[in-house]
Amino acid sequence: MPIVLLIAALLQAASANKVDIVSVTGCLREQTTGEWMLMNATDPVSSNANAPAKNEIPATPPLGKNQFKLIGVSEFNLPQHKDHAVIIKGLHIKAQPVSRLNITSVTTISPACPAK
């Protein structure tokens, strides 16, 4: 295989395994001590790692059907956001049965989760 084709194949494989930074809105729940989930979450949308700008925060929290296990939680004071509607930004790690989000920011939208 010519070196150019090999390099192209390696670059394509690397981009296929890329972990995207996303923004997801949902309800922050503590399952057991220190194990956090984002419930009733929206579909992930491409984003950056920074906290959302004021114009990115919806007036009413949207209700979704997804759930995500949250990792990298020790850097954030999640108990202050417990049972709140939040925007989580982070690395989206696709997995079965539950995908994970490695958190880069947490922003409260509402002190209560929307009713189903």
Image (cartoon, helix red, strand yellow):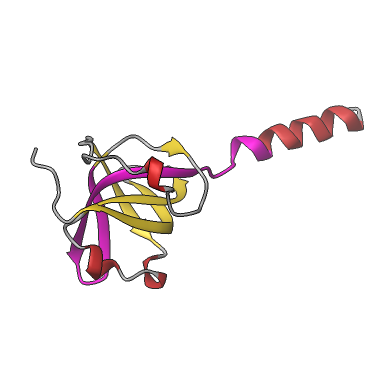
Q: Quadrant of residue 66?
A: top left
Furthest residue in direction left, as rendered:
115
Question: Along the horizontal axis of the image, is 35 left or right of 45?
Answer: left
**Coordinates of residue 74 in the picture (x, y in percent):** 38, 72
**Coordinates of residue 25 in the picture (x, y in percent):** 30, 44
Residues drawn in magenta: 14-40
Q: Does the magenta stretch include residue 23?
A: yes
Question: Along the horizontal axis of the image, is 28 left or right of 16?
Answer: left
Question: Along the horizontal axis of the image, is 94 left or right of 7?
Answer: left
Q: Which of 103 and 53 is in front in this view?
A: 53
In what quadrant of the picture does the C terminus appear?
top left
Question: Along the horizontal axis of the image, is 109 left or right of 92?
Answer: left
Please name the predominant secondary structure of the magenta segment in the image: strand
Q: Which of 40 and 108 is in front in this view?
A: 108
**Coordinates of residue 109 in the picture (x, y in percent):** 26, 50
In what quadrant of the picture does the N terminus appear?
top right
- Name the residue at 42% across, 58% down: 105
Q: In which quarter of the image is residue 9?
A: top right
- Name the residue at 83% across, 32% down: 6
**Coordinates of residue 55 in the picture (x, y in percent):** 39, 41
Q: In which quarter of the image is residue 40?
A: top left
- Name the residue at 51% across, 52% down: 49
Q: Which of 2 and 62 is in front in this view?
A: 62
